[in-house]
Image: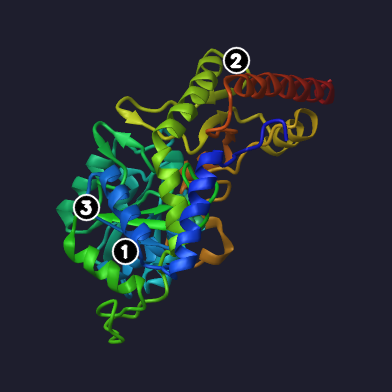
């Protein structure tokens, strides 16, 4: 593809280093819960400026472990409906029930008013999701609401490695946070996840849950209903190499985003940037652009792919959780803002491998695709 929706970045030096470290692990047999996992945890905790991090095998397991450590059995967890399936599914797997809340158009994240309306005596926790890498400036208000009612706030920071609000990094706002290193993310360990927390009790519980609920590594004495949620050494080796590049990956993504911002801000073509609020430094996991109601997203995506070889990445998100068949029956009202958000945006291609010229090409293609769509529409009206 001339411009793919996303792509991963490994230099030849990275590949050599990964190969050498893998070779050492294969030779020594240190393949899980070893030094690379521990170092990855230390380095990631430093990034998030928290004392503790626990490496696991996915972002989904990071969420479930946190929820199990808090204890949400037979209770409700408030989940913004505009999120990935895994956020809500983890609640159910941990024995809780998601209650879906609305999202705000400015950041696509949990709406503070809707959160207040959802809270009740059976609320065990609240999850906020940093959509596209953007931390909502309302997180301090949301955090305060949670504090007042004594309910923990959890960050689903799957999108937000290296994002900040003011001088605080993602992963340091809630009682605990869950990150994902799935290959489309800003950094990857191929598969993998990380829990960050400043709470020692949550940290200790997470270590137990991650390894089959065992009281300690060397025992077979099981004190929790854990699972095999361990991160292997090969995954940790890949993740550490990627983490070293995170600042430069984000810088490149920001450069691409600035090209998009500059041209889309003055545009009258029916597409506008989602403005990143002041004080927020997004890692630009996604570049979100808002569509005027008349623009058909599916037609636009097909035109960009077939005529210009440009791939738009997946939306965040196309269908809100409360409209997913699998979550039918869980409490949610009509969540109109989220429904509009989901229907009314696209995500332009962005990655650490894109050049400024690629971004210009995407915008030229977008302009031409929209022009031809408007011509066809005008002909239909005539
Ligand atoms: C918001 C969100 N939460 C959780 C996850 C789950 O992460 P993983 O795929 O690593 O299990 C993802 C993954 O894409 C995500 O986007």
Please name which of the two marks, 1 or 2, marks the residue nearer to the observer. 1
> Could you tell which of marks 2 and 3 lies nearer the N-terminus?
3
Residue 340 location in percent, x, y? 53, 40
Quadrant of res 127 = bottom left
> Could you tell which of marks 1 and 2 lies nearer the N-terminus?
1
Left or right of residue 262: residue 128: left
From what the image shows, is residue 222 above or below residue 336? Answer: below
Left or right of residue 291: residue 220: left
Crowding around mark 1 (Cα neighbors within 10 Å: few <14, some 14 to 19, many 20+) is many
The residue where tag 2 is placed is 268
Crowding around mark 3 (Cα neighbors within 10 Å: few <14, some 14 to 19, many 20+) is some
Foreground residue among 85 and 188: 188
The residue where tag 3 is placed is 146
> Could you tell which of marks 1 and 3 lies nearer the N-terminus?
1
Foreground residue among 51 and 156: 51
Residue 133 location in percent, x, y? 42, 39
Which circle marks residue 66 in the picture? 1
Please name which of the two marks, 1 or 3, marks the residue nearer to the observer. 1
Report how far apart the C-alphas of labels 1 and 3 lie in the structure.
17 Å
Report how far apart the C-alphas of labels 1 and 2 lie in the structure.
45 Å
Q: Are marks 1 and 2 in contact (CB under 8 Å)?
A: no
From what the image shows, is residue 112 above or below residue 21? Answer: above
Left or right of residue 331: residue 75: left
Quadrant of res 64 = bottom left
């Amino acid at each position: 593809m001339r411009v793919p929706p996303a792509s991963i970045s490994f230099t030849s030096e990275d590949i050599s280093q990964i190969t050498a470290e893998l070779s050492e692990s294969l030779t020594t047999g240190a393949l899980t819960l070893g030094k690379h996992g521990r170092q990855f945890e230390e380095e990631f905790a430093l990034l998030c400026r928290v004392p503790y991090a626990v490496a696991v095998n996915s972002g989904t397991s990071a969420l479930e472990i946190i929820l199990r450590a808090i204890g949400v059995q037979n209770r409700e967890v408030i989940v913004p409906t505009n999120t990935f399936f895994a956020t809500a599914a983890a609640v159910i797997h941990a024995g809780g029930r998601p209650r879906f809340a609305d999202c705000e158009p400015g950041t696509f994240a949990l709406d503070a008013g809707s959160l207040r309306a959802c809270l009740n005596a059976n609320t065990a926790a609240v999850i906020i999701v940093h959509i596209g890498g953007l931390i909502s400036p309302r997180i301090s208000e949301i955090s305060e609401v949670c504090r007042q009612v004594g309910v923990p706030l959890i960050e689903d920071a799957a999108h937000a490695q290296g994002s900040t609000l003011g001088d605080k990094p993602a992963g340091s706002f809630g009682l605990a946070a869950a990150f994902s290193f799935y290959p489309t993310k800003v950094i990857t360990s191929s598969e993998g996840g990380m829990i960050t927390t400043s709470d020692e009790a949550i940290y200790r519980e997470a270590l137990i849950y991650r390894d089959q609920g065992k009281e300690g590594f060397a025992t077979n004495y099981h004190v929790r209903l854990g699972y095999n949620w361990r991160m292997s050494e090969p995954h940790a080796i890949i993740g550490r190499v990627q983490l070293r590049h995170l600042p430069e990956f984000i810088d490149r993504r920001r450069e691409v985003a600035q090209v998009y911002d500059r041209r889309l801000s003055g545009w009258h073509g029916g597409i506008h940037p989602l403005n990143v609020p002041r004080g927020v430094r997004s890692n630009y996991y996604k570049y979100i652009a808002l569509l005027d109601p008349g623009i058909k997203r599916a037609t636009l995506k097909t035109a960009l792919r077939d005529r210009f070889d440009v791939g738009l990445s997946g939306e965040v998100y196309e269908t809100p959780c409360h409209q997913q068949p699998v979550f039918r029956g869980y409490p949610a009202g009509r969540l109109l803002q989220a429904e509009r958000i989901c229907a009314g945006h696209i995500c332009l291609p962005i990655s650490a491998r894109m050049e400024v010229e690629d971004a210009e090409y995407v915008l030229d293609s977008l302009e031409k695709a929209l022009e031809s769509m408007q011509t066809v529409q005008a002909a239909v009206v005539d």
